[in-house]
């Protein structure tokens, strides 16, 4: 790790030297970039400003860039973890699911929104519009844009209660069918299926997601609890843009 850090510091030093170096020519240059050579002077020197060698744009220099984040290894790591800027900005800037959208998703996945049980997903959903940031038209309050801590907690509670219904209804849910073929969240051995995960999140599933789903199932005290946690976690991840 120390060796890698030293290499990064050397590369950054070379980059900074290229930006902040003093005047050219055969003469010597001082540490602040004000060279005494006979070559071309830096923008600071030519304009008579202090701190010659600045990377700020000016009359003698149109190249203006940020000196931060010059470590190429750091940039590469950020791209590998977050994706390129044109992708990561979309993934990490989406707003919360609208209150009505949550209800529609539950309904499409087979949840009975007419249920009246005190702990049913339908009742928790109907009693949680304020926590979920629903609009209050009477008070002229628009739908909240960002997901709050209470909203995320309430949303996960709903998904946990809805999970058994979703698992049972998935084979007959039109939104989960691939062509005319029914989709099951779990196979005969109780393992997660790619088709089931894809239905929950609305995008193709990766093997890594299948592995995480199976880990959630096998790590619980019972298989039923594990399946509930797995389904709720996938829905929460998709519903919170994470």
Image (tube, grey):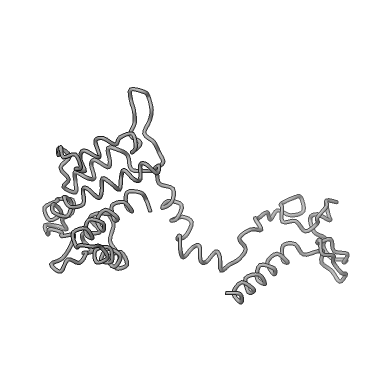
Q: Give the left or right position of residue 224, taking residue 145 as reference.
A: left
Q: Nearer the viewer, residue 104 or 59?
A: 104
Quarter location, residue 135: top left
Q: In this view, does 6 lie above or below 233?
A: below
Give coordinates of residue 1: x percent, y percent. Answer: 57, 74
Give coordinates of residue 206: x percent, y percent. Answer: 30, 65
Q: Give the left or right position of residue 84, taking residue 235 as reference.
A: right
Q: Give the left or right position of residue 224, taking residue 71 as reference.
A: left
Quarter location, residue 17: bottom right
Q: In this view, does 67 lie above or below 12?
A: above
Farthest bottom residue?
A: 3
Q: Is residue 224 above or below residue 90?
A: below
Farthest top residue?
A: 138
Give coordinates of residue 136: x percent, y percent. Answer: 34, 28
Give coordinates of residue 101: x percent, y percent. Answer: 28, 41
Q: Is residue 59 above or below residue 220?
A: above
Q: Nearer the viewer, residue 215 or 82?
A: 215
Residue at x-position 28% and y-position 60%: 204
Q: Give the left or right position of residue 108, taking residue 236 as reference.
A: left
Q: Which of 87 and 92 is in front in this view?
A: 92
How many discs appear?
A: 0
Residue at x-position 45% and y-position 60%: 82
């Amino acid at each position: 790790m120390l060796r890698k850090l030293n290499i990064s510091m050397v590369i950054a030093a070379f980059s900074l030297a290229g930006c902040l170096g003093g005047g050219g020519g055969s003469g010597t240059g001082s540490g602040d970039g004000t060279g005494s050579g006979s070559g071309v002077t830096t923008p600071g020197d030519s304009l008579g400003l202090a701190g010659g060698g600045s990377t700020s744009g000016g009359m003698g220099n149109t190249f203006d860039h940020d000196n931060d984040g010059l470590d190429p290894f750091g940039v590469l790591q950020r791209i590998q973890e977050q994706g390129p800027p044109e992708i990561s900005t979309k993934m990490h800037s989406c707003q919360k699911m609208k209150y009505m959208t949550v209800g529609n998703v539950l309904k499409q996945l087979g949840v009975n929104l007419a249920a009246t049980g005190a702990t049913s997903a339908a009742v928790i959903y109907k009693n949680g519009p304020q926590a979920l940031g629903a609009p209050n038209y009477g008070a002229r309050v628009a739908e909240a844009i960002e997901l709050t801590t209470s909203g995320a907690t309430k949303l996960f509670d709903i998904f946990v209660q809805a999970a058994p219904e979703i698992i049972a209804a998935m084979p007959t849910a039109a939104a989960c069918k691939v062509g005319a073929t029914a989709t099951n969240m779990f196979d005969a051995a109780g393992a997660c299926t790619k088709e089931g995960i894809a239905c929950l999140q609305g995008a193709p599933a990766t093997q890594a997601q299948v592995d995480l789903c199976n880990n959630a199932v096998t790590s619980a005290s019972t298989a039923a609890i594990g399946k509930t946690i797995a389904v709720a976690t996938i829905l929460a991840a998709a519903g919170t843009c994470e």
